[in-house]
Image: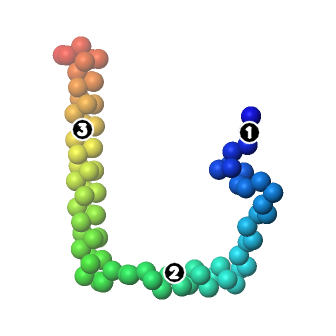
Amino acid sequence: MPDSKAVHGERGGSAPKRTSIPTFYRQVVAELRKVVYPTQEQLITYFIVVMVFVVFMMTLVSLLDLGFGKLAFEIFSGGS
Protein backbone atom coordinates (compact mmCIF):
# COMPACT_ATOMS: atom_id res chain seq x y z
CA MET A 1 0.00 0.00 0.00
CA PRO A 2 1.54 3.38 -0.97
CA ASP A 3 2.21 5.98 1.70
CA SER A 4 -0.05 9.01 1.67
CA LYS A 5 1.71 12.36 1.29
CA ALA A 6 -1.11 13.99 3.27
CA VAL A 7 -0.17 11.96 6.33
CA HIS A 8 3.58 11.65 5.98
CA GLY A 9 4.52 14.75 4.00
CA GLU A 10 7.05 14.80 1.18
CA ARG A 11 9.39 11.85 0.98
CA GLY A 12 12.92 12.64 1.96
CA GLY A 13 11.89 16.08 3.25
CA SER A 14 12.98 17.31 6.64
CA ALA A 15 10.57 18.14 9.43
CA PRO A 16 9.66 21.84 9.80
CA LYS A 17 11.73 23.79 12.32
CA ARG A 18 10.12 24.58 15.65
CA THR A 19 9.61 28.17 16.75
CA SER A 20 11.73 29.29 19.67
CA ILE A 21 9.98 30.18 22.93
CA PRO A 22 10.74 33.94 22.76
CA THR A 23 9.46 34.09 19.17
CA PHE A 24 6.33 32.20 20.20
CA TYR A 25 5.58 34.68 23.00
CA ARG A 26 6.22 37.66 20.71
CA GLN A 27 3.73 36.21 18.23
CA VAL A 28 1.18 35.61 21.01
CA VAL A 29 1.48 39.22 22.20
CA ALA A 30 1.18 40.50 18.62
CA GLU A 31 -2.00 38.47 18.10
CA LEU A 32 -3.48 39.64 21.41
CA ARG A 33 -2.94 43.25 20.34
CA LYS A 34 -5.22 42.58 17.35
CA VAL A 35 -8.10 41.52 19.61
CA VAL A 36 -11.01 43.96 19.73
CA TYR A 37 -12.39 43.92 23.25
CA PRO A 38 -16.06 44.82 23.84
CA THR A 39 -16.99 48.10 25.47
CA GLN A 40 -18.57 48.08 28.92
CA GLU A 41 -21.99 48.77 27.38
CA GLN A 42 -21.63 45.82 24.98
CA LEU A 43 -20.43 43.61 27.82
CA ILE A 44 -23.48 44.47 29.94
CA THR A 45 -25.79 43.86 26.97
CA TYR A 46 -24.20 40.48 26.20
CA PHE A 47 -24.37 39.52 29.89
CA ILE A 48 -28.09 40.34 30.07
CA VAL A 49 -28.84 38.45 26.86
CA VAL A 50 -26.98 35.38 28.07
CA MET A 51 -28.64 35.47 31.51
CA VAL A 52 -32.14 35.79 29.98
CA PHE A 53 -31.42 32.86 27.67
CA VAL A 54 -30.08 30.72 30.53
CA VAL A 55 -33.09 31.49 32.75
CA PHE A 56 -35.45 30.70 29.85
CA MET A 57 -33.73 27.38 29.17
CA MET A 58 -33.72 26.48 32.87
CA THR A 59 -37.45 27.18 33.05
CA LEU A 60 -38.16 25.18 29.90
CA VAL A 61 -36.14 22.16 31.03
CA SER A 62 -37.64 22.32 34.54
CA LEU A 63 -41.20 22.41 33.18
CA LEU A 64 -40.51 19.55 30.78
CA ASP A 65 -38.93 17.53 33.60
CA LEU A 66 -41.91 18.20 35.88
CA GLY A 67 -44.40 17.32 33.13
CA PHE A 68 -42.66 14.11 32.06
CA GLY A 69 -42.19 13.14 35.71
CA LYS A 70 -45.91 13.53 36.44
CA LEU A 71 -46.77 11.67 33.23
CA ALA A 72 -44.47 8.78 34.16
CA PHE A 73 -45.92 8.70 37.68
CA GLU A 74 -49.46 8.56 36.29
CA ILE A 75 -48.56 5.77 33.84
CA PHE A 76 -46.72 3.58 36.33
CA SER A 77 -48.86 4.19 39.42
CA GLY A 78 -52.07 2.91 37.85
CA GLY A 79 -53.69 6.30 37.32
CA SER A 80 -55.49 6.54 40.66
Tell me: 21 left or right of 53: right
What x and y, as percent, mark residue 68?
25, 31
Residue 48 appears at what percent x and percent y?
24, 69
- Circle 2 sits on which residue? 31
Asked whether the beta carbons under mark 1 and mark 2 sit within 8 Å of each other, the answer is no
**What residue is shown at x 72% (from left), y 51% (from top)?**
8
Q: Amino acid at mark 2?
A: Glu
Q: Residue at x 27, y 31 (%)?
A: 69
Q: Indicate which label's residue lies in the foreground, 3 or 1.
A: 1
Camera-nearest residue between 73 and 65: 65
**Disc on the earlier residue, 1 or 2:** 1
Viewer-side residue, 25 vs 56: 25
Residue plotted at (38% across, 81% down): 36
Q: Which mark is residue 2?
A: 1
Q: Which mark is residue 64?
A: 3
- Badge 2: residue crowd in 10 Å (few <14, some 14–19, many ≥20): few
